[in-house]
Amino acid sequence: MLEHPDHPADQHCKELLQRLIQSHGYLLQTGPEWCLYSKRNDYARPVDRVGRALVKILRDKGHLVPRPAGGLEPLKVKLEKSGRFTDHRPERPLEESRHPEINDAESPLAWLRSRKDKAGRPLISAEQFMAGERLRSDYERSCLERRVTAAWDLPATAGRSGGTGGAHLTDAALTARQNLNDALDEAGPELASILVQVCCLAAGIEQAERSLDLPQRSGKAVLGLALTALARHYGYIRPESRRRRNSGFGHWALGDYRPAIPVAEDS
């Protein structure tokens, strides 16, 4: 079983993640433990068991994400399956970031967009949806999947700076990373976390609530606020239009009406 109290947790996290990536494996929960399935035996039966604590660490850090068929798989494997981050894939022009490609099969936002509330309206607006997909697109372009193994795989050497790996990124990736950081900064620390969980890591609402320790059933409301802030940052929602919608009418009057200003009486 992949969990030994005599060794540091980080070491076992590294070993488990590398093993899953190399074998294109995944985890399925059975009772209190997780079973590891591997391509080595064509996923016929579990090849190992993993403790909950180890899985929780990797899940909370975003290294493990839900897989469509159930269970968890490494973020890196999921992105490779979808054809992203391949060395042979040509870079798309940065101008396309305003209209990101959308994969409805993988996007939690697409699921929310397709559902309606009691009034028959989509759970998220078109502006919120496009803002979230644009953030996801910037996340993918920025090559942030390298963080899955970079912190553990690169040996610490004298003279190495904080290990950002910037020297290995293209100009397009660096620009996308800056766009991503700007958007999250604009959303603020209170809302940025749920944007990362749902838009970037493709976590469902309930999983995001657990990861961020949010009250149950509050995720949709928090995500809605975050997506609105994001849409405003990207210019999909104009602040002046929003002010007009919120202003309402004070009272009706003819075009030449002028309000009377009372004159203060002398005391």
Image (tube, rainbow, N blue to C red):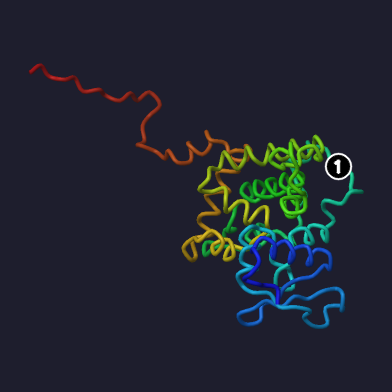
Residue 45 location (% of width, % of height):
80, 83
Q: Residue at x 10, y 16 (%)?
A: 266
Instruction: Name the residue nearer the viewer: 23 or 256.
Output: 23
Is 251 located above or below residue 102 in the figure? above
Secondary structure under the numbered disc 1 in the rendered image: loop
**On the picture, is 127 further left or further right than 70?**
left
Instruction: Name the residue nearer the viewer: 232 or 31.
Output: 31
Q: Determine the image quadrant of residue 67.
A: bottom right
Is 243 located above or below residue 77 in the figure? above
Tally of marks: 1
Q: Determine the image quadrant of residue 113.
A: bottom right
Residue ranking furthest to the top: 266
Q: Residue at x 60, y 51 (%)?
A: 195
Residue 238 location (% of width, % of height):
57, 36
Q: Residue at x 58, y 58 (%)?
A: 123
Residue ranking furthest to the left: 267
Residue 7 location (% of width, % of height):
66, 66
Residue annotated with mark 1? 91
| Amino acid type assigned to the residue bearing label 1 in the image | Glu
**On the picture, is 199 further left or further right than 24?**
left
Residue 27 location (% of width, % of height):
72, 73
Q: Residue at x 48, y 66 (%)?
A: 216
Instruction: Name the residue nearer the viewer: 127 or 56.
Output: 56
